[in-house]
Amino acid sequence: VLQIQEMFHEFDKDKSGSISVYEAKLMLRKLNMPDSEIETLVALHDKNKDGELQYDEFVGFVLNS
């Protein structure tokens, strides 16, 4: 769980408490993941449909990606 918290804080560049699609792209492009795949994964795990991943949504994103 600690590793996931550290990853969340690393992704959350603006320290807003949620990860935007832009922030996800900044991190996942380093893994050569295409933007379209990143957008799909964020949308899939964005349970409240606010366009961002809160911590609980991010946990699902990490564990199921």
Image (cartoon, rainbow, N blue to C red):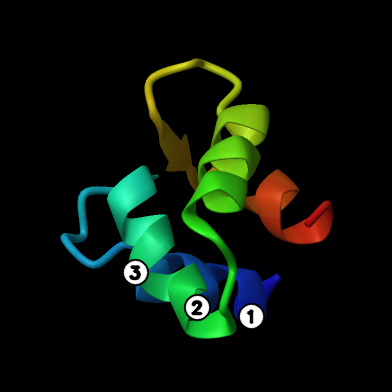
Q: Find disc 2 in the rendering and name its residue.
A: 6
Observer-nearest residue: 29 or 50? 29
Counting residues from the start of the chain, the first of labels 3 and 2 encountered is 2
Q: Find disc 3 in the rendering and name its residue.
A: 26
- Specify the amino acid type for callout 3: Leu
Q: Find disc 1 in the rendering and name its residue.
A: 3
Q: Is residue 33 above or below residue 21?
A: below
Quadrant of the image containing the N terminus? bottom right
Counting residues from the start of the chain, the first of labels 1 and 3 encountered is 1
Residue at point 62%, 49% (across, down): 37
Disc 3 versus disc 2: distance between alpha carbons? 16 Å
Mark 2: which secondary structure?
helix
Mark 1: which secondary structure?
helix
Disc 1 versus disc 3: distance between alpha carbons? 19 Å
- Specify the amino acid type for callout 1: Gln
Residue at point 62%, 70% (across, down): 4
**In the image: residue 17, left or right of residue 38:** left
Q: Are marks 1 and 2 in contact (CB under 8 Å)?
A: yes
Mark 3: which secondary structure?
helix
- Specify the amino acid type for callout 2: Glu
Question: Dot 1, how many residues are within 10 Å of its Cα: few (below 14), some (14-19), or many (20+)?
Answer: few
Q: Position of residue 49 (x, y in %)?
A: 48, 16
